[in-house]
Amino acid sequence: MNITSLNEQFGHPEYLVFETDNHGQARVRLSTARSNLTLYLQGAQITSCFLPAASEPQYPVADDLFWVSKSSVYTKGKSIRGGIPICWPWFGPHERPQDRPQHGFARTSEFMVTSASVGNERSQITLKMTRALPTFPEWQLADAPGVDCEVRITLSEQLRMILTTTNHLAHNIEVGSALHSYFLVSDVSQIQVPELQGIEYLDKLQAYKVLVQDQPLQVDREVDRVFRHPPACISLIDPGLGRTIRIETTGTRNLVVWNPWTETARAMRDLDDDGYPHMICLEPANALDQVQSLMPGEQHQLSQTISLTQ
């Protein structure tokens, strides 16, 4: 469906506008009276969101919730580096990495809008994957009943995102997933996530060694940790921006914390060399040995609700 048709069927001149960016990629601007976000149809990927502060709920805050690399590639089949890429139906490297992309294929696949509703206080859009890029026959996502991937985004004074997986196949499947959120921070070395203290994690940088976060989280070097059974609500405290982001999750067995730091950032072509101090990934996930098993007909939902508490 082209941009004109999308605007005719779902659009609203004030609250829901479909457009093409400067790179020719289709995106959505979804708004309420006090909040707004930008969403790309490829990957159903949010790249920007402004919410009202708890202290001044009538106004959106000056700083974006999310970080996006200035070196991101905006082209078909490439994921944007930042915002909230959706990792699905696996997280991290596949067991066959030679012909399966990192983090699955949802973030590079086409999504279609299936419904939308807008208003002064609340706006919502639902998208469903229509064509997997690249296509893998075991998921049967193109022409036959297979595994559905649906994303519902609700914007109010909060941002709520629900990733729904439905197994229409005749056999069990295992699905890994993550909402790979890149949060904008003033200085990553100064942030706090107090709820993670005392939680067990796997350290990818130490061959997935099992450790416990026995001290407050300190990001002063590369961090790549998969926390097991994290609390359902965490706080990202940023003294420099003077804000606390509250993240509530459901349907998740892990929380991934990632920052590439200097050397890894330099090795990534789509990540600014000087960008890493201003981002932290806090990702509700079902990963590694804690993926979700779905029998025929079963459904699973992974969600996060993001708000500003100050």
Image: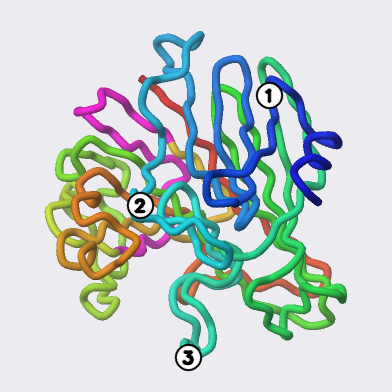
Q: Badge 3, how many Cα within 10 Å: few under 14, some, many 20+?
A: few
Give the Cα distance between marks 1 and 2.
28 Å
**Label 1 SS:** loop
Which residue is labeled 1 in the image?
15
Which residue is labeled 2 in the image?
281
Please name the amino acid that badge 2 sits on: Cys
The disc placed on residue 156 is: none
Pinpoint residue 186: horizontal percent, then vertical percent.
Answer: 22, 35
Front residue of 278/171: it is 278
Q: Which residues are magenta?
A: 225-246
Whether residue 36 is situated above or below residue 107 in the rendered picture:
above
Which residue sits at x=44%, y=73%?
A: 92
**Label 2 SS:** strand
**Label 3 SS:** loop
Which residue sits at x=60%, y=51%?
A: 25
Depth check, mark 1 against mark 2: the one in front is 1
Give the Cα distance between marks 2 and 3.
26 Å
Give the mark nearer the N terminus: 2 vs 3.
3
Give the Cα distance between marks 1 and 3.
43 Å
Which residue is labeled 3 in the image?
98
Whether residue 255 is situated above or below residue 237 in the rendered picture:
below
